Image (cartoon, grey):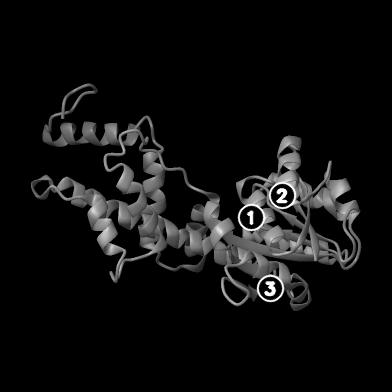
């Protein structure tokens, strides 16, 4: 099989490498020509000088997989790509697009006879070695064509990928997946901060997290990664207390509101990320002022020692 990969960032490039290992021919394009040249030399990928060139180097049905930022970059690329394709060709969006956008794009491409698949893709930088978890949305015909490619990217031919529903279902499933991820990460962070704060026990967080990895109810890949990180540094003094949030975390909370489903853990985990991004801390400053106004509580001024 053969496909074009548009966008050769960390995820896109590693997906190309894994596909090549699986015997899939890949035509690759990225705005950074040096990345294209280097990856072609390393993996045997066929280099393309433009999106047009990448499409021209495919044979039908042509498959174009996009690994681009969500929003305008993906929207503009799909709009520009459609005129280059013909009936029976397939576009795959492997980025973290909003599922509402995905559904709309699927309808628009279907009107032109172009197949569409949304692939919620998890695995991060470890996907190359371990395989990717792929949650895909498409009609049955498109899913059947894409099956060998999905099997090559997944941990095995039988596990780690699934056709979960129609167009939009893949990105929706990945969105909820990321919301759950926020909650799990927040829970681990809070628990470990409590352990660290109990100074009288002088707990070794590397020892405790390594212990939990074996037969504990809370064992998980996130715990594995946390334990490995703490082996090298338990103070984390060089890490800024700033945690970005992806669009998917926000979209998950919005979905909970739309459905009228209580999701306090996922919502609070997102809010805690917002809190870490508040460099000015105005809300906390105002809370301190209020406490002083009604109760005469002392205000700690900037620069005061703890």
Q: Earlier in the sequence, mark 2 or mark 1?
A: 2
Q: Is residue 67 left or right of residue 306?
A: right
Quadrant in the picture for the C terminus: top left
Q: Element under label 3?
A: loop
Q: Position of residue 284 (x, y in %)?
A: 29, 36
The label number, if any, that marks residue 74 in the structure image: 2
Q: The residue tagged with tag 1: helix, strand or loop? A: loop
Q: As displayed, is residue 202 above or below residue 222? A: above
C-alpha gap between disc 3 and disc 2: 20 Å
Percent x, y for residue 174? 56, 63
**Image spot of residue 26 (x, y percent):** 77, 56
Local packing at callout 2 (Cα closer than 10 Å; few below 14, some 14-19, many 20+) is: many
What residue would you read off at disc 1? 97
Question: Which circle's residue, 1 or 3, is located before the other in the chain?
Answer: 1
- The residue shown at (23%, 31%) is 289
Q: Secondary structure at mark 2?
A: helix
Q: Quadrant of residue 60?
A: bottom right
Q: Tell me whether the residue at label 2 lies in contact with that at label 1, contact meaning CB atoms closer than 8 angstroms.
A: yes
Identify the residue at horizontal 62%, vertical 56% (top origin): 98
**Residue at which label 3 appears:** 166
| Earlier sequence position, callout 3 versus callout 2 | 2
Relative image position of residue 24 (x, y in whole percent) = 75, 63
Residue 286 sits in quarter: top left
Q: Is residue 35 left or right of residue 113?
A: left
């Amino acid at each position: 099989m053969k496909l074009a990969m548009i966008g050769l960032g960390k995820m896109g490039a590693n997906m190309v490498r894994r596909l090549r290992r699986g015997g899939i021919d890949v035509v690759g394009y990225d705005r950074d020509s040096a990345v294209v040249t280097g990856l072609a030399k390393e993996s045997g990928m066929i280099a393309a000088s433009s999106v047009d060139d990448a499409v021209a180097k495919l044979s039908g049905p042509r498959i174009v997989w996009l690994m681009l930022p969500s929003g305008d970059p993906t929207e503009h690329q799909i709009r520009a790509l459609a005129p280059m394709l013909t009936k029976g060709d397939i576009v795959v969006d492997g980025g973290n697009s909003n599922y509402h956008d995905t559904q709309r794009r699927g309808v628009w491409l279907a009107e032109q006879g172009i197949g569409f698949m949304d692939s919620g893709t998890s695995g991060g930088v470890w996907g190359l070695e371990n395989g990717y978890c792929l949650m895909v949305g498409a009609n049955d015909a498109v899913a059947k064509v894409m099956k060998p490619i999905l099997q090559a990217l997944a941990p095995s031919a039988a596990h780690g990928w699934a056709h979960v529903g129609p167009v939009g279902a893949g990105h929706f499933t990945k969105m909820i997946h990321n919301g759950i991820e926020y909650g799990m990460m927040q829970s681990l962070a809070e628990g470990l901060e409590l352990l660290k704060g109990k100074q009288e026990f002088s707990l070794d967080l590397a020892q405790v997290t390594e212990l939990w990895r074996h037969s504990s109810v809370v064992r998980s890949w996130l715990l594995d990664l946390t334990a490995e990180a703490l082996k090298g540094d338990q103070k984390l003094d060089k890490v800024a207390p700033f945690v970005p949030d992806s669009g998917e975390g926000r979209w998950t909370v919005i979905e909970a509101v739309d459905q009228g489903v209580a999701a306090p853990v996922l919502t609070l985990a997102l809010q805690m990320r917002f809190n870490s991004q508040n460099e000015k801390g105005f809300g906390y400053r105002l809370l301190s002022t209020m406490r002083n106004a009604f109760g005469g509580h002392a205000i700690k001024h900037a620069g005061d020692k703890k």
